[in-house]
Amino acid sequence: MTTEDAQAAAGTAEGQGPVEIDPEMARHLENKREELFEKFGIPDEFPPEVLEEAKERTQGVQAEIEDEVDEREDLREMTTWTTDPIDAQDFDDAISIEEREDEIVLWVHIADVTHYVNPDTKMWEQAVERGNTVYLPAYTVHMLPPVLAETVCSLVPNEDRLAHTVEMHLDKENLGYEEINIYKSVIRSDARLTYTEAERLLDEPETAEDVLEDQSVDLAEKTERVWELADRMHEQRKEEGSLVLNPARDRAHTIIEECMLKANKAVTHELMWNRGVEAMYRVHPQPSPDEWDEALVEIQELDGVSIPGDAWDDPRKAVNATLEQAPGRQLDKIQWAVMKVMPRAKYMNDPFGGHHALNFEIYGHFTSPIRRLSDLINHWIVYSNDVPEDLIALCDRASDRQKDAEQCEREYKNFLQEVGLDPSAVNNRGIEVVENPDDEDDADTDAADAAVEE
């Protein structure tokens, strides 16, 4: 690696390395996690019978996949890849793209978790109990046993995997759905990209062979195509009134976010309009006009911030335009002013009411069945067309567990700050326990690191 490359790497989570703490601090963090897990009823350990069931379900998988090929779409020859953070433990979504003369075809492949986890399994019961995976900085409480989620359900490169594919034929001009197909498939991911590697492919496609061993040139071209599509979808969402609270998100994150939103919306369209079935829809109520006025006035009064005059009629567009022009020091305050008046999104069996923040008439989750109960349920409904009898209770359960997880994460981050650790640095870089941590790796340094990373 050249000196220039080393300096560039130092600006990334990978380049900086983990935050170092001593054993005593590690014990403090462990005790705090245990306290929070008890407070919010979050089970950190899986029952032995669930772990045993998960382990058994990983046996003989390759032969099982071969048996499934004739019953599924065989997409193993299609260029397919995943893009995730450097510390991702499982890969539940992959993408493929093809630009044709009159259309763009986008494939989003989701791990077919319900092939292994169904209502008759103990793992399903545990998923309902947990509701979602809980992500704390440098610590994860899984919804499904990692022995399953991180192996046969993970779309690792160069391995055949069972997937649920959302195939979307998009109009080249307006990016509307010309055709939506959802089906079981067998895929074979060609590469596992980190966000940093994806950015490098976009900046320097000629260096693709340094990042990837196989299909490097093809994947560099595909990454460029999907970035162009994602950028257009992102701008279109903003123009149509979708709220974008993080205007500085990098290209790799934008690719994944926009592709997953497009797939989730496509599945919801299929469930509601083509099948007319109940499902776990994501409903986000809107603030009252007075609440929006309160937020906009608070934003307008911030030093150096001005809401464009032509944006006041639509609060979401007003916030978007303001975030793009505001000084960086005010971004957190603008976001907080909005979040204070924004009602919580919740899961409901009735989609009507829509998703206010996204400005989607109907929306639901499908792309993360390893970490969200809602997606697992929707996979089962799409596949079986069978709606669980207790769907309303499941919606309430998923909503409540998400609220608990978010509050647990918030309190744990506050605790990290209290003991002199920066939550962003810990989250991005992880933790390493050492006997004598570097004195320079203190809270001030971590805070500076976090500012660079963000």
Image (tube, rainbow, N blue to C red):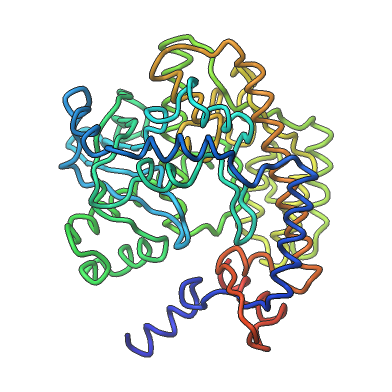
Q: Which is nearer the eye, 151 or 421?
A: 151
Q: Is 51 rendered above or below residue 269?
A: below
Give the residue at x 41% y 33%: 113
Q: Position of residue 196 (x, y in %)?
A: 41, 66
Q: Is residue 286 left or right of residue 54?
A: right
> Residue 428 at x, y = what percent?
56, 65
For the point 41% across and 12% down, the residue is: 274
Whether 297 is drawn above or below 21: the answer is above
Residue 140 location (% of width, % of height): 59, 52
Residue 222, how many percent across, how many down?
25, 51
In the foreground, 433 or 122 = 122
108 vs 391, nearest the viewer: 391
Residue 338 seen in the current view: no
Q: Is there any visible trace of residue 137 in the rendered image?
A: yes
State how many labels appear.
Answer: 0
Task: Please give left or right for residue 306 compared with residue 61 in the image.
Answer: right
**Is 344 placed above or below 254 here?**
above
* Residue beneath the point at 67% across and 27% down: 397
Which picture quadrant has residue 210?
bottom left
Task: Assign the N terminus to one quadrant of the image.
Answer: bottom left
Quarter of the C terminus within the rendering: bottom right
Q: Is residue 421 above or below residue 140?
A: below
